[in-house]
Amino acid sequence: MGRGADEIKWPLHFEVSRVTVRAKEVVEAAGGSVRRVYYNKLGLRALLKPEWFAKKGRLLPKAARPPPK
């Protein structure tokens, strides 16, 4: 979190793939939350175009696990 970290005064809730320690501390200090998520190709498609799954009568896929290190 660069400039403007002092200006967060209300709770914000984020889902991100990466986050710095400083940014997470600032958001949580304001009462918000930061959730790290991993999107594979199918999960990203479901996030960007959920109507594609509805049109085909399919359920949205569950969140993927990150690949092993």
Image (cartoon, grey):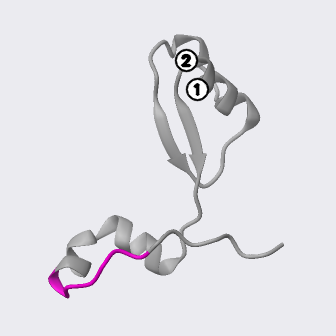
Specify few, some or many for label 1: CA neighbours under 10 Å numbering under 14, 14-19, or 20 or more: many
Question: Residue 60: within the magenta?
Answer: yes
Q: Amino acid at mark 1?
A: Val
Between marks 2 and 1, how big is the CA–CA gap?
Answer: 5 Å
The residue that disc 1 covers is 27
Question: Residue 48: within the magenta?
Answer: no
In this rendering, the answer to whether 31 lies above or below 60 is: above
Where does residue 1 sit, x and y in percent of width and height?
64, 29
Is 68 on the left-hand or right-hand side of 11? right
In this rendering, the answer to whether 64 lies above or below 14 is: below
Is 59 on the left-hand or right-hand side of 34? left
Rendered residue at 37%/65% (across/down): 47
Specify few, some or many for label 2: CA neighbours under 10 Å numbering under 14, 14-19, or 20 or more: some
Are the residues flagged by discs 2 and 1 in contact, CB closer than 8 Å? yes
Q: Which residues are magenta?
A: 55-61
Where does residue 52 sit, x and y in percent of width and height?
23, 79
Name the image quarter holding the C terminus.
bottom right
Q: Depth check: 24 or 64 in front? A: 64
In this rendering, the answer to whether 48 lies above or below 16 is: below
Describe the element under mark 2 as helix, strand or loop.
loop
Q: Which mark is residue 53?
A: none
Describe the element under mark 1 as helix, strand or loop.
helix
Where does residue 45 sit, x and y in percent of width and height?
38, 75
Q: Amino acid at mark 2?
A: Ala
Rendered residue at 75%/34% (across/down): 21
The residue that disc 2 covers is 30
Residue at the left extreme, as displayed: 55
Magenta stretch: dominant secondary structure: loop
Rendered residue at 66%/31% (across/down): 23
